[in-house]
């Protein structure tokens, strides 16, 4: 995964998103890095496959991430978790969402984008099941709509 995170295109996209959303990159956090590494391993994509997407789909990936971020803030995903599985989230002390993110945050969106780009919805569902995302089918439909808006304007 380090090959992706240290890729020039990855960092250009991170910088665009930081500027666009007013985000702040947090200090390296081993725990967060391990979560994203786990997602990467379970995705069955290679670093090289994702780097090609970073290179060839930079503009679409930025649009997808921005749309995914704006849509996720409108959804109440908490209701879809079973008791004891509530999402931790990036909630700050005042109960709002923090603008501080890990430099690894793009990995999740990149993986989802890759599945959608290859029209591999079954693979995306299997990936979500591996990483224990509740309501996977509904979420895949929403992501697919976002992807289509991103690609088709």
Image: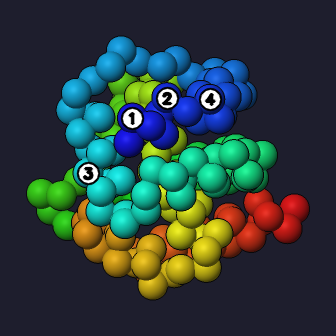
Q: Which residue is mark 3?
A: 38
**Mark 1 secondary-structure assignment:** helix
Give the label on residue 6, or none. 2
Q: Is residue 122 left or right of residue 29?
A: right
Distance from the alpha carbon under mark 1 to that under mark 2? 6 Å
Near mark 4 (Cα within 10 A), the count class, few <14, some 14-19 or many ≥20, is: some
Near mark 3 (Cα within 10 A), the count class, few <14, some 14-19 or many ≥20, is: some
Relative vertical location of residue 103 with respect to residue 39 in this rendering, above or below: above
Q: Residue at x 41, y 28 (%)?
A: 102
Q: Residue at x 51, y 74 (%)?
A: 140
Distance from the alpha carbon under mark 3 to that under mark 2? 18 Å
Q: Which residue is mark 4?
A: 8
Q: Which residue is mark 1?
A: 2
- Closer to the observer: label 3 or label 1? 1
Q: Sequence order check: which comes first, mark 3 or mark 2? A: 2
Which of the 4 quarters of the picture holds residue 9? top right
């Amino acid at each position: 995964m380090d090959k992706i995170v240290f890729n020039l295109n990855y960092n250009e996209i991170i910088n665009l998103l930081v500027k666009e959303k007013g985000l702040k990159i947090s200090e390296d956090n081993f725990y967060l890095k391990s979560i994203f590494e786990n997602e990467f391993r379970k995705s069955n994509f290679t670093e090289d496959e994702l780097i090609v997407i970073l290179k060839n789909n930079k503009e679409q990936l930025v649009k997808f991430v921005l749309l995914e971020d704006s849509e996720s803030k409108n959804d109440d995903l908490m209701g879809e978790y079973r008791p004891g599985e509530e999402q931790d989230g990036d909630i700050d002390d005042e109960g709002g969402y923090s603008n501080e993110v890990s430099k690894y945050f793009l990995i999740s969106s990149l993986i989802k984008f890759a599945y959608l780009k290859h029209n591999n919805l079954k693979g995306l569902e299997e990936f979500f099941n591996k990483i224990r995302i509740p309501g996977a089918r509904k979420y895949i439909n929403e992501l697919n709509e976002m992807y289509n808006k991103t690609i088709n304007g």
